Amino acid sequence: MQIRASTVLPARREDVELHTADGLTLVGELALPAERDPVATLITLHPLPTHGGFMDSHVYRKAAWRLPALADLAVLRFNLRGVSSPRGTSEGTFDNAEGERFDVAAAIELAEFRDLPRRWLVGWSFGTDLVLMHGCDPSVEGAVLLSPPLRFSPPSTSRPGTPPASPSSPWCPSSTTTCARPRPRSGSRRSPRPR
């Protein structure tokens, strides 16, 4: 099979609504493998809305079109507060990465409610700042950061082992002093590189 720019592979796609703790409804889409349960889940956070970022940004649209069929992944993409796309407009207004913490939490909660496995946050540009600032959640296994501008997230959130930017986030226990880092797989310890 040859995959071209506009290739859409089979999947179960459904429109979803996410409900934030501050009372907003966000619009999105969940793409699932056509005939199997997903093996993992990508929760996507799009680029800066004030510069054209939305759930249909090409990287995420193509991920939703192809990864359910090619890799058995669930792909959740949605518009952050105040953002419009062909799917619709999410309620609210852009809040400079502050109110968006509720959007991130709503996406994680939807994935938990739907029992989607092995949740990973995928941030692209502005979305990477949201992952670093608000993605500390025990149900999230890891993060993928694409083109991180680190414009909104404080420097402490971009270094492993430092306190999260918002330890009072509704899903991050107040006793948490660091965000969870991926645990090494047994037997995967690296030996020092020769000099």
Image (spheres, rainbow, N blue to C red):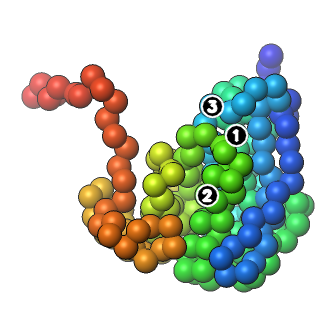
* Quarter of the image where the N terminus is located: top right
Nearer-N-terminus badge (2/1): 1
Residue labelled with disc 3: 39
Q: Does 48 appear above or below 147?
A: below
- For label 3, the SS is loop
Q: Position of residue 13 (x, y in %)?
A: 85, 43
Amino acid type for the residue under numbered disc 3: Val
Residue 85 x %, y %: 84, 64
Q: Which quadrant would residue 192 be assigned to in this image?
A: top left
Q: Which dot marks residue 101? A: none
Distance from the alpha carbon under mark 2 to that under mark 1: 13 Å
Residue position marked by numbered label 1 in the rendering: 74
Residue situated in front as seen by the camera: 163 or 4: 163
Question: The C terminus lies in which quarter of the figure?
Answer: top left
Q: Nearer the viewer, residue 195 or 74?
A: 74
Residue linked to disc 2? 108
Q: Earlier in the sequence, mark 3 or mark 2?
A: 3
